Amino acid sequence: MGGHAHKPEGGPPPEGMEKANSPTYPVGTTVTLTADHMPGMKGSEATISGAFDTTAYSVSYTPTDGGERVTNHKWVVREELENPGNAPLEEGTEVVLDADHMAGMDGAEATIDSSTDETSYMVDFTMDGMKMTNHKWVVESEIQPLK
């Protein structure tokens, strides 16, 4: 499974998330993913299931379930950090994750690697025969219009 064994069903967005007012890719838009967060993702056709104005962070963390350290995980959003403070947090800031995208993530101590204030999207797509719904997260620069 490796470091990017995401759950097939991403669930709803975290409470308090602000929907994007005028996202480039509105909910229901079919797009092409350019992100390569996990094998088989890049080039996949996806449907936007949510668009939000927030700060997204790339983080490195050691899973609470004893798994191998995950480095440069893209992405967790501000609303998935315990006591997130003012965005954007500086690189190197220590945080606690309040996200469950993957096993061992919730409650893990993490370090901020980078941040972006691009629109953050949830997407539905099929990868290696597995349908993923409300996958969290891809940011605007990781999406292209469907060709």
Image (cartoon, rainbow, N blue to C red):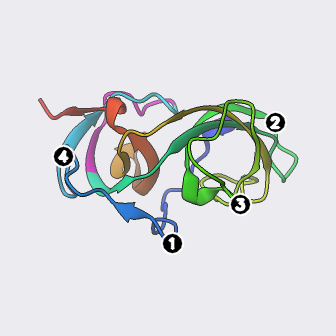
Report which residue position mark 4 lands on: 30
Q: Which disc number belongs to residue 68?
A: 2
The amino acid pointed to by label 1 is Glu
The span from disc 1 to disc 3 (Cα, nearest Å) is 13 Å
Local SS, label 4: strand
Q: Earlier in the sequence, mark 4 or mark 1?
A: 1
Contact, CB < 8 Å: mark 2 with mark 4? no
Which of label 3 and label 4 is nearer to you?
A: 3
Q: Position of residue 27 (x, y in %)?
A: 22, 58
Secondary structure category for the residue under label 3: loop
Magenta span of residues? 39-47
How far is the residue under mark 3 from the one under mark 4? 33 Å
Q: Is residue 43 magenta?
A: yes
Label 1 and label 2: CA atoms lie apart by: 29 Å
- Above or below, 68 against 80 in this view is above
| Quarter of the figure with the N terminus | top right
The residue at the point 51 percent across, 32 percent down is: 37
Residue 15: which disc?
Answer: 1
The reply to whether residue 25 is in sight is yes
Is any part of residue 2 visible from this angle?
A: no
The residue under label 3 is: 82
Residue 44 highlighted magenta (yes or no): yes
Residue 51 vertical placement versus 139 (above, below): below
- Mark 3 surroundings within 10 Å by alpha-carbon count, few (fewer than 14), some (14 through 19), many (20 or more): few
- Of residues 100 and 8, the one drawn nearer to the viewer in this rendering: 100
- Quadrant in the picture for residue 41: top left
Residue shown at 33% from the left, 37% from the top: 140
Direction from residue 48 to residue 112 in the image, left or right: right
